[in-house]
Image (cartoon, grey):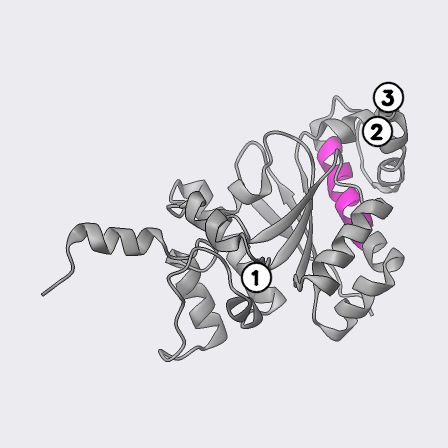
Amino acid sequence: MPDKPSTRRDDHLHRRSFLKSAGIATATTALGMTSAWHLAYGAALTKAQREKLTPDDIIDLMKKGNQRFRLGKESPHDYLAQQKASAKGQYPAAIILSCVDSRAPAETIMDLGIGDCFNARVAGNIANDDILGSMEFACKVAGAKVVLVMGHTACGAIKGAIDRVQLGNLTGLLAKIQSAVDATSYQGERSAKNYAFVDAVARKNVELTMAGIHSRSAVIAELETTGAVKIAGAMYSVESGVVDFLAFAPRP
């Protein structure tokens, strides 16, 4: 006798958000998995599921999640079930360094759920010593395989750095972005009023932050060298909702 519609719907709602719907098909195809491998109906990413994914697989799942977000076809998250399933242990696949901007919540725009990723947020997505330490914990101790630095368009912190804003503790934070302002090659008006320049600086800031993570963290650099971890970069458009993963030459 076939399942009742309500039963089938409940089963679907309890499938893992990070590895279901389009994501399941993508991961299965990418990994060449046979029908013998299947996902549990639990609501949290398990260690076994994460271990079957490479850093590139995880990035691909993030891309697919953003595509679902843009199309308005997000996974039907059961956050309560995810919370309960992850309460006794977590196996995040990535750590995301993003900006505090209210329009750029990383989990939402890449259709991720509770337990899928660590998320460090600071204005201008800069990597200070505390952020680096958090990344080292996430990767070396907790087993995350991707370090994603995500900037965004129309970034207020970038504008502030361009204008050399002086405001309490913000002054020191913006000073850390100044190198990206100086390093940005741009033909045109180099001001915070020129959004094209602002976005170019934001992209350069992502690049420099990625390089800084590699050069300032021997722990993550070693994991990256062995292929256990990948440092990636992305720019999110607050206008279109697109997360554009940036292509950089691999580091030696």
Are dots 2 and 3 in contact, CB under 8 Å? yes
Q: Disc 1 vs disc 2: which is toward the camera?
A: 1
Q: Is residue 242 visible?
A: no
- 40 vs 176: above or below: below
Q: Position of residue 186 (x, y in %)?
A: 80, 37
Q: What residue does disc 2 label? A: 161
Q: Which residue is mark 1?
A: 58
The disc at residue 250 is none
Helix, strand or loop under label 1: helix
Q: What's the magenta bit mostly, secondary-structure-wise?
A: helix
Q: Is residue 118 above or below residue 170?
A: below
User: What amino acid type is highlighted by mark number 3?
Assistant: Val
Q: Which residue is mark 3?
A: 165
* Direction left: furthest residue: 1
Label 2 sits on a secondary structure element that is helix
Classed neighbour count for the residue bearing mark 1: other residues with Cα under 10 Å, few (<14), some (14–19), many (≥20): many
Q: Quadrant of the N terminus?
A: bottom left
Q: CA distance from mark 2 to mark 3?
A: 6 Å
Report the mark closest to the observer, 3 or 1.
1
**Residue 209 magenta-drawn?**
yes
Q: Quadrant of the C terminus?
A: bottom right
Q: Residue at x 85, y 32 (%)?
A: 173
**Residue type pointed to by label 2:** Ala
